[in-house]
Amino acid sequence: MTGLKDLLRTENLSRADVELILATAAEFAEHPLKHSNSLVHKSVAIYMTKPSTRTRLASETAVAHLGGTPIFLRGDELQIGRGETINDTAKVISQFCSALIIRTYAQSDVDQLGKYASIPVINALTDEDHPTQVLADWMVIRERFGSDVSGRKFVYVGDGNNVANAWLIIGAIMGAHVVAATPAGKFAISPEVISKSKSLAAASGGKVEITNDAKAAAEGASVIYTDVWMSMGDSESERDEKFKALSPFMVNDDLMKLTTKDSIFMHCLPAHRGEEVAASVIDGAKSVVWREAFHRRTTIQALLHLLTRGELKGN
Ligand code: CP
Ligand code: NVA
């Protein structure tokens, strides 16, 4: 197969791929059963070693809408937990299933699965990345602002985590002006992600800004995005230090007042009201969090449909 076999990292997508995924997802939003024979008599493995509400529901319903059977596998249910190798597991799953959706800790495990599986492998969150989330987020951006994002600023505020990384990378691919406002030091965006997103932006005509000043970032923003302060797998021993560093980055009404009139508030969910976001913001008029959750299904459905047909090109 030429083109893109897997979606292992957000950076693997070209702008044309994202455009095709968004257009296909828009069709699935209108007509969930369009292509209901796409995976008929086929199965998709969904393997998760971390909890999930949205991604699991979105993945299982996406497979069902395409006519296939989802097989959900928890981390402790496979022999991999007893020492069977990733490579052997990848080869076996490839003989039964038409795609593998994987949520786990190490990005390198997902990369390795992609290498050894003959079927498409989709990253459903690692410690470093969350590509399927930001595709759903870009559906909402499209619905709200259309395809011309020039003059708009898309700001992530909070922990420099997997979602922040994916936010910068997809924004850079799409030629947008993306900003991350995080604390300096331990909870900042990694130098690798900054350099990758800046090089993608240089090629796409986008712009990446990194700051430690949430208010300056929010000034004139079209989007304020945030995520939990403690991600799955984060060490509980860091909680106090992390919350102290992140407290100036809480998204509240004062911060939202600095944004544009038509601005929106985004959050991948799950949320912790009173920590990274005030209840008045996430439950307020600017919040689009339920639409983001809705588009988890449409975008994963689009990805499965397109990847199993070899229709994505990669970059
Ligand atoms: N946003 C997201 O990935 O949610 P879940 O952890 O519930 O899948
Ligand atoms: N950063 C969060 C995202 C959850 C969807 C985590 O990794 O737990």
Image: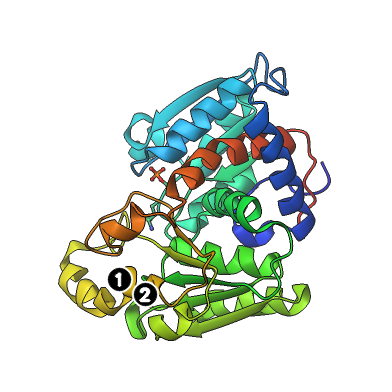
- From this viewpoint, which residue is outermost toward the right? 2
For the question of whether residue 291 can be seen, the reply is yes
Image position, residue 163 (x, y; %): 46, 61
Give the residue type that dot 1 points to: Met
Q: Check disc 2: other Cα within 10 Å, few if <14, some if 14-19, many if 20+.
A: some
- Assess mark 2: CB under 8 A from ligand 2? no
Q: Nearer the viewer, residue 132 or 211?
A: 211
Give the residue type that dot 2 points to: Leu
Could you tell me which residue is drawn at 52 percent across and 50 percent down? 133
For the question of whether residue 96 can be seen, the reply is no
List the residue tagged with mark 2: 255
- From this viewpoint, which residue is outermost toward the top? 41
Image position, residue 15 (x, y; %): 75, 59
Q: Is residue 217 above or below residue 1?
A: below
Residue 31 falls in which quadrant of the image?
A: top right
List the residue tagged with mark 1: 250
Image position, residue 87 (x, y; %): 55, 42
Q: Quadrant of the N terminus?
A: top right
- How far apart, in angstroms, are the residues tagged by discs 2 and 1? 8 Å
Could you tell me which residue is drawn at 38 percent across and 61 percent down? 227
Q: Nearer the viewer, residue 137 or 234?
A: 137
Assign a secondary structure to mark 2: helix
Mark linked to residue 191 = none
Image position, residue 96 (x, y; %): 60, 22
Dot 2 or dot 1, earlier in sequence:
1
Q: Nearer the viewer, residue 274 or 198?
A: 274
Of labels 2 and 1, the one closer to you: 2
Asked if disc 2 and disc 1 are in contact, CB closer than 8 Å, the reply is yes
Q: What is the number of callouts on the image?
A: 2
Task: Tell whether 24 sits left or right of 198.
Answer: right
Task: Tell whether 78 sits left or right of 61.
Answer: left
Assign a secondary structure to mark 1: loop
